Image (tube, rainbow, N blue to C red):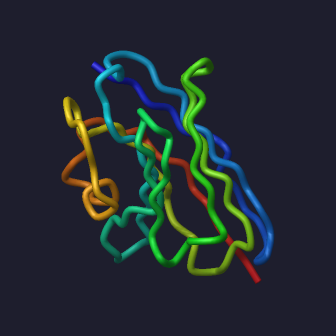
Amino acid sequence: QVQLVESGGGSVQAGGSLRLSCVFSGYTRSAYCMGWFRQAPGREREGVAAINTVNKSGFYADSVKGRFTISLDNAKNTLYLQMGSLKLEDTAMYYCATGCYGWTSVTADQALGSPRYNYWGQGTQVTVSS
């Protein structure tokens, strides 16, 4: 089993920054991917950023490239999402997830696709206002 607990969400004005954290425990050793997803009311869940847990390379949705940075601290069992230059359209519930178990390679499309993920946190709300 895997447990994922997100924190760091909140309300922020457009142009501001937030850092989300996801503390994980349990069976994560062979998870080749970890990612951040978001879902706004009335919209489908979308991949925001993901990371290859072996070489720490990141993958980003076009909508957040240059504004968001994903990072992984294995010593602290924590996945981060640093969000900057926030826009109104970034308002959503943000979830962290682990997946790609047993994989040895991954493409950006695969890493940002929710079907590859097996375990999910409960989410943390991010609200951006003008």
Q: Is residue 112 above or below residue 65?
A: above
Q: Residue at x 55, y 49 (%)?
A: 124
| Residue 101 drawn at (x, y percent) | 22, 32
Q: Is residue 44 found left or right of 40 in the rendered image?
A: left
| Residue 1 drawn at (x, y percent) | 27, 19
Q: Is residue 109 above or below residue 69?
A: below
Query: 112 or 16: which is nearer to us?
Result: 112
Residue sitting at the far bottom: 130
Query: 22 or 13: which is nearer to us?
Result: 22
| Picture mark count | 0
| Residue 64 drawn at (x, y percent) | 56, 72
Q: Is residue 54 found left or right of 5 in the rendered image?
A: left
Query: 20 or 11: which is nearer to us?
Result: 20
Q: Residue at x 43, y 41 (%)?
A: 122
The quarter of the rendered structure image containing the C terminus is: bottom right
| Residue 47 drawn at (x, y percent) | 38, 62
Q: Residue at x 28, y 39 (%)?
A: 99
Q: Residue at x 69, y 55 (%)?
A: 10
Q: Is residue 108 found left or right of 61 in the rendered image?
A: left
Q: Is residue 118 found left or right of 72 in the rendered image?
A: left
